[in-house]
Amino acid sequence: MSQVSAVPVAGAPSVPTIPFGQLAPWALFFGLLGTLVLFFVSTDQGAVSLLAGTAIHEWVHDGRHLLGYPCH
Amino acid sequence: MTARAFLIRGLIAGLVAGIATFFVAYSVGEPHVETAIALEESGTAAEEAPTDASHDHGDEAAGGHSHTHSHSHGDEGEDTEVSRDSQRTWGLLTGSLAVGLALGGIVALVAAGTIGRMGRLQPGQSTALITLLGFVAFALVPFLKYPANPPAVGSGDTIGDRTALYFGFVVVSVLTAVAATYVALRLRNRLGTYGGVVAGAAGYLAVMVVAGQLFATVNEVGDFPADTLWFFRRASLFTLATMWGVIGVVLTGLVGRLYAAQTERAQRRALAASL
């Protein structure tokens, strides 16, 4: 919490922003990780298979249907 | 207000949302999944078993409703069978939690990038708005074009096309929403908040209506019972709304508290400095 960017003015503090440069590594890392997780739950071993077999597809099968991703 | 603080709060919101989503999906959605699978196995469903027998209906004698798909690529690797009991409990929980955590973290980082950059909105307000836009662009509008289908609807032969169409539409929707939000914020300076928001929303709507016309329609419902289809799709929409709604409520609350605590500290420091 030491990297507060905006210097608040006494009385009416302006809304702080987070510099994009500071945000970029987090966004890149978690963006990739999150996309990968979404891919494995929604698509893997369906239209595209990164991992062989059907274990992931079968395990998350109901979630895939109910969260609205194309299945079968 | 750091990226790290937002990510942690997003993961907490995602965890809570994943748990809530599981309970909603289990209680509202699973009965219709079971109905659909029963229809599929009794052979009355629209999609008859493909000629290449790509649907393996499992050992019905042993497991009752063992619902497995080997698809056409089933010969590439060994098939793993997961019992229906596991699929509708731990499997559903796994999927809900994974999607909740991923979406919660991503939404939080987007919200982190927008605080202080959306007009005069406070951090909690812009976070709530980002989550709402995420629900509309990532879940609701794609659902309107390509609604969720229960088991037994959808041919294994078209999964490639359907997946490409679905995610293509999602990408168009999300990119359009990002652009529309940016345009709305820029136009706000000239037209005011009302004009900017109306222009941005109308732009998103116009692009998505055109995209909806251009993207191919998928209809593999056949003579699958309309009531079961509607119940399943409604349950799926409830599931998605729960996911995004809980992420929005929890994350907005946490970000609001974070900002309030920071504001209070800053004011105390300013007061101390003025003495």
Image (cartoon, coloured by chain):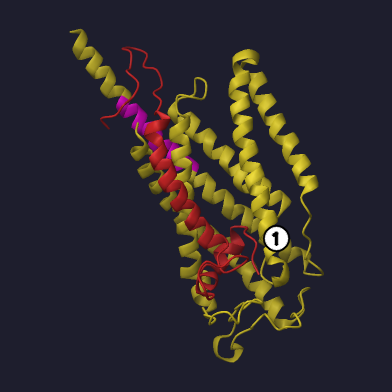
Chain colours: A red, B yellow
Instruction: Measuring from the top left, give residue B42's x and y in whole percent.
Output: 72, 82
Q: Which residue is mark 1?
A: B162
**Residue B9 visible in the displayed image:** yes
Instruction: Measuring from the top left, give residue B201's x and y in whole percent.
Output: 68, 30
Q: Quadrant of residue B75?
A: bottom right
> What's the magenta region?
B248-262
The amino acid type, in three-letter code, at marker 1 is Arg
Element type at marker 1? helix
Q: Is residue B267 above or below residue A34?
A: above
Q: Quadrant of residue B37?
A: bottom right
**Which secondary structure is most common in the magenta stretch?**
helix
Quarter of the image for the C terminus of chain B: give it: top left
Please tell me which residue lies in front, A60 or A26. Answer: A26
Quarter of the image for the N terminus of chain B: give it: top left
Residue in the image at 58% along x and 49% along y: B241
Residue in the image at 28% along x and 17% along y: B267
Residue in the image at 50% along x and 74% along y: A55
